[in-house]
Image: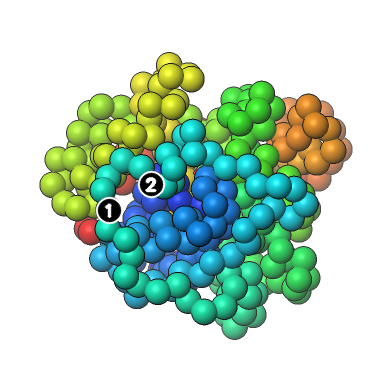
C-alpha cells in the first residue's frame, strides 16, 4: 500500500504539533507533501514559525512549509492564547527555526499541488480554521473534484462548544470557510470534540512520552503538561485532549475510530450559535449526508500508536 499523500493545514498549537510529529514519524503510511500555516490558535506569523519549529524537532527540515491566510474570510481573527500560551507552543523551550518558509502563498500551494497530482490522490488534513482550504476551493472551483478526502479536526455536537457554548474553536473562527468546505461535496471525515475529548493525556500516558527520553518525546510531554491546565480547570478532565493527532492517527489506523455518515451544517448567521456544527446524528431531516462524524476512539490503541511512532523521531 503506497503512503497516503497529504497536505497538513495547521495553526500550531501544541496538539497540532503532536499531529505533525505523528505524521512525520510515519513515512510508510503518510507522505507529507507540504504544511500550510493558517491563523488560528495564535496569529499567522507564529503559526508559520511554529510549524517549522515542529518540523525541525522531528528532524525533518526538508518539509515544505507555506504561510497562508492571516484572517478569516469574513470576520476578525479570534485567537486562543489562553489555551496555548502567547507563543502557541508554550511548554518546551524549543529553538527558533532555521529552515525557511517556502516562497508563495499556502493557498497557491494547495491549488497547484492538487492540480499536479492525479485526481483523488491527495488528502487535505486541516487542523485549524478552514480559511486556507476554503479560499483555495473558492479560487479554484475545479479543486473539489480533485481532493481524495478531507480529514479534519473541528466541530462538536453532543460535546457542545469549547470557545462558545455552541461552537468548537476551528469552526467558530471561520464559519464561512467551514460552510464552503462542508458544502463542497468533497468526502469529509471530521474529528469533533465528541471524539477528541476521549483522547486524554493521562499522567501514565504523558509519562510514557517522557520515558522515550528523546527530544521529541520530552517536548511532547512538556507541551501536554502546559496544554492540559486549561481543560483540567474547565472540564475537570484527567488530562489534555489530543484533538489534532486524531486526524493523523486516523490516516494510519482508521480502525481505532468509529462514527456515522450524516449531514452536518454550519451556523453562519446567528450570533448566539455562530460556528455550531449542526449534526443530524439521528437523521431527523432529509438533508444529504456530507460528513463522517467520528464519535468513538480506542484511546489505549491511539496512545500506543502515538508513543510507538514518536519513538521513531
Ligand atoms: O478546538 C480544538 C481545536 O482548536 C484544535 O485544533 C486546537 O489546536 C485549536 O486549533
Ligand atoms: Ca489546531
Quadrant of res 240: top left
305 relative position to 119: left or right: left
Q: CA distance from mark 1 to mark 2?
A: 9 Å
The quadrant of the rendering that contains the N terminus is bottom left
Q: Is residue 279 above or below residue 160?
A: below
Number of residue marks: 2
Q: Residue at x 65, y 28 (%)?
A: 164
Q: Position of residue 276 (x, y in %)?
A: 72, 34
The residue closer to the viewer here, 276 or 306, is: 276
Q: Residue at x 45, y 72 (%)?
A: 101
Q: Residue at x 21, y 45 (%)?
A: 218
157 relative position to 14: left or right: right
Q: Are marks 1 and 2 in contact (CB under 8 Å)?
A: yes
Quadrant of res 175: top right
Q: Which mark is residue 94?
A: 1
Q: Position of residue 192 (x, y in %)?
A: 58, 37
186 relative position to 168: left or right: right
Asked if the beta carbon under badge 2 is closer than 8 A to the nearest atom of ligand 1, the reply is: no
Q: Residue at x 81, y 45 (%)?
A: 288
Q: Position of residue 239 (x, y in %)?
A: 36, 26
Question: Which residue matches tag 2?
Answer: 89
The residue closer to the viewer here, 85 or 34, is: 85
Q: Residues within 10 Å of mark 2 (few under 14, many from 20)?
A: many
Q: Which mark is residue 295?
A: none
Q: Is residue 313 above or below residue 210?
A: below
Identity of the residue furthest to the bottom in this view: 116
The quadrant of the rendering that contains the C terminus is bottom left
The residue closer to the viewer here, 257 or 181, is: 181
Q: Is residue 124 above or below residue 285?
A: below
Amino acid at each position: 500500500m503506497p503512503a497516503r499523500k497529504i497536505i497538513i493545514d495547521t495553526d500550531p498549537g501544541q496538539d497540532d504539533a503532536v499531529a505533525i510529529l505523528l505524521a512525520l514519524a510515519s513515512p510508510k503510511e503518510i507522505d507529507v507533501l507540504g504544511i500550510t500555516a493558517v491563523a488560528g490558535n495564535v496569529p499567522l506569523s507564529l503559526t508559520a514559525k511554529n510549524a517549522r519549529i515542529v518540523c525541525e524537532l522531528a528532524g525533518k527540515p526538508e518539509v515544505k512549509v507555506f504561510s497562508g491566510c492571516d484572517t478569516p474570510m469574513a470576520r476578525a481573527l479570534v485567537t486562543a492564547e489562553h489555551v496555548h500560551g502567547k507563543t502557541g507552543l508554550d511548554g518546551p523551550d524549543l529553538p527558533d527555526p532555521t529552515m525557511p518558509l517556502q516562497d508563495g502563498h499556502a493557498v497557491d500551494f494547495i491549488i497547484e499541488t492538487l492540480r499536479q497530482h492525479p485526481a483523488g490522490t491527495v488528502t487535505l488534513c486541516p487542523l485549524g480554521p478552514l480559511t486556507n482550504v476554503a479560499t483555495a476551493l473558492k479560487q479554484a472551483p475545479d479543486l473539489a473534484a480533485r481532493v481524495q478526502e478531507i480529514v479534519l479536526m473541528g466541530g462538536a455536537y453532543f460535546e457542545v462548544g469549547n470557545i462558545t457554548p455552541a461552537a468548537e474553536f476551528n469552526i467558530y473562527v471561520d464559519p464561512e470557510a467551514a460552510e464552503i468546505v462542508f458544502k463542497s461535496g468533497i468526502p469529509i471525515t471530521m474529528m469533533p470534540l465528541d471524539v477528541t475529548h476521549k483522547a486524554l493525556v493521562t499522567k501514565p500516558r504523558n509519562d510514557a512520552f517522557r520515558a522515550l527520553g528523546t527530544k521529541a518525546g520530552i517536548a511532547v510531554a512538556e507541551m501536554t503538561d502546559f496544554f492540559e491546565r486549561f481543560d483540567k480547570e474547565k472540564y475537570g478532565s484527567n488530562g489534555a485532549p489530543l484533538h489534532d493527532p486524531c486526524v493523523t492517527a486516523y490516516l494510519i489506523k482508521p480502525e481505532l475510530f468509529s462514527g456515522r455518515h450524516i449531514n452536518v451544517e454550519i451556523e453562519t448567521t446567528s450570533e448566539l450559535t455562530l460556528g455550531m456544527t449542526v449534526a443530524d446524528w439521528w437523521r431527523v431531516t432529509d438533508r444529504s449526508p456530507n460528513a463522517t462524524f467520528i464519535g468513538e476512539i480506542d484511546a489505549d490503541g491511539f496512545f500506543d500508536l502515538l508513543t510507538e511512532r514518536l519513538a521513531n523521531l
